[in-house]
C-alpha cells in the first residue's frame, strides 16, 4: 500500500486540531501518556514506559505511515497544547476497512475531546480514503471509550475474546463498527 498522506490542511473543528506529530512533541507526549488511565487501557507492555519508548514508537509510526499501515496524529487545542493522540491503523485496503484509536491526556478529559477527534478522523477517512467500514476496539472496562464510540454513531458488535496480547497476557476487546453515512456529527459538546 502507498504511504498515507497527512490531512492537508490539518483536521480541525475550531476547538480540536489533528496534526502530524513532531519530534518537539515527544517529551510532552511521554508526560501525557504516562497518566495511569492511559497506561491501564493503552500501554500494551509490562514495563514502565520511558521517553525511549516514545521515541521508538514515533519512529515506528512514521515507518508504518510510509508503508500505508497507520496514520498517527497529535490531538492539540487552538494554541497547540497537546491533548492526546489518535490514529487510523489496521488498514485492510482490499476490504476498504481500518480501525480508529485515540488516547486523551488527563487535563483534556471530560471535554468531548475524544468524541470530536473520532468524528473528525472518521469523517475524513470515509471521504478521503473511501473506507466502507471503520472499527473501534477498546477494553471492556473502558466505559468512557465505549461512550465515545456510541456518541459518534458506532454500533457495538460484541466482544472479541482473548483478542490481543496485552501487559504480559491477553485482553478481550469490545468491537464497534461505523459505516459510511452513520457518523453522528453533532457538535453540541463544548470544550471548556
Image (cartoon, rainbow, N blue to C red):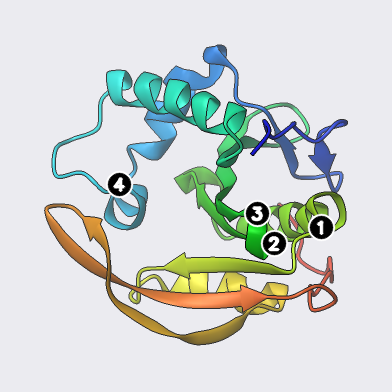
Name the residue tied to disc 1: 130
Question: Residue at image x 34%, y 43%?
Answer: 35
Which mark, by number, is residue 93?
A: 3
In the picture, measured across the screen, residue 92 lies left or right of residue 170, that is right
Residue farthest to the front, as pictured:
94
In the picture, measured across the screen, residue 37 lies left or right of residue 84, that is left
Q: How far is mark 2 from mark 1, CA to CA?
A: 7 Å
Q: Quadrant of the N terminus?
A: top right
Q: Earlier in the sequence, mark 1 or mark 4?
A: 4
Question: Residue at image x 67%, y 30%?
Answer: 3
Eyeballing the image, is 114 above or below 172?
above
Q: Nearer the viewer, residue 165 or 45?
A: 165
In the picture, measured across the screen, residue 108 lies left or right of residue 142, that is right
Q: How far is mark 1 from mark 4, CA to CA?
A: 30 Å
- CB-based contact (under 8 Å), mark 2 and mark 1: yes
Which mark, by number, is residue 176?
A: none
Q: Is the residue marked by circle 2 packed among few (<14), some (14-19), or many (20+) residues within 10 Å?
A: some
Name the residue tied to disc 2: 96
> What secondary structure is marked by label 2?
loop
- CB-based contact (under 8 Å), mark 3 and mark 1: no
Question: Residue at image x 81%, y 33%?
Answer: 10
Q: Earlier in the sequence, mark 3 or mark 4?
A: 4
Name the residue tied to disc 4: 43
Amino acid at each position: 500500500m502507498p504511504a498515507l498522506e497527512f490531512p492537508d490542511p490539518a483536521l480541525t473543528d475550531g476547538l480540536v486540531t489533528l496534526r502530524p506529530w513532531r519530534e518537539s512533541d515527544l517529551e510532552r507526549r511521554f508526560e501525557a501518556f504516562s497518566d495511569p488511565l492511559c497506561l491501564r487501557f493503552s500501554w500494551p507492555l509490562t514495563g514502565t514506559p520511558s521517553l525511549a519508548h516514545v521515541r521508538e514508537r514515533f519512529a515506528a509510526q512514521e515507518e508504518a505511515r510510509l508503508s500505508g499501515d497507520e496514520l498517527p496524529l497529535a490531538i492539540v487545542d487552538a494554541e497547540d497544547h497537546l491533548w492526546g493522540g489518535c490514529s487510523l491503523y489496521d488498514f485492510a485496503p482490499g476490504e476498504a476497512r481500518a480501525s480508529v484509536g485515540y488516547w486523551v491526556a488527563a487535563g483534556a478529559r471530560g471535554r468531548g475531546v475524544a468524541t470530536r477527534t473520532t468524528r473528525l478522523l472518521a469523517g475524513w477517512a470515509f471521504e478521503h480514503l473511501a473506507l466502507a467500514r471503520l472499527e473501534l476496539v477498546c477494553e471492556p472496562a473502558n466505559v468512557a471509550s465505549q461512550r465515545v464510540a456510541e456518541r459518534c454513531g458506532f454500533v457495538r458488535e460484541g466482544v472479541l475474546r482473548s483478542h490481543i496480547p496485552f501487559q504480559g497476557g491477553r485482553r478481550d476487546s469490545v468491537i464497534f463498527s461505523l459505516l459510511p453515512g452513520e457518523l453522528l456529527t453533532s457538535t453540541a459538546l463544548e470544550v471548556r
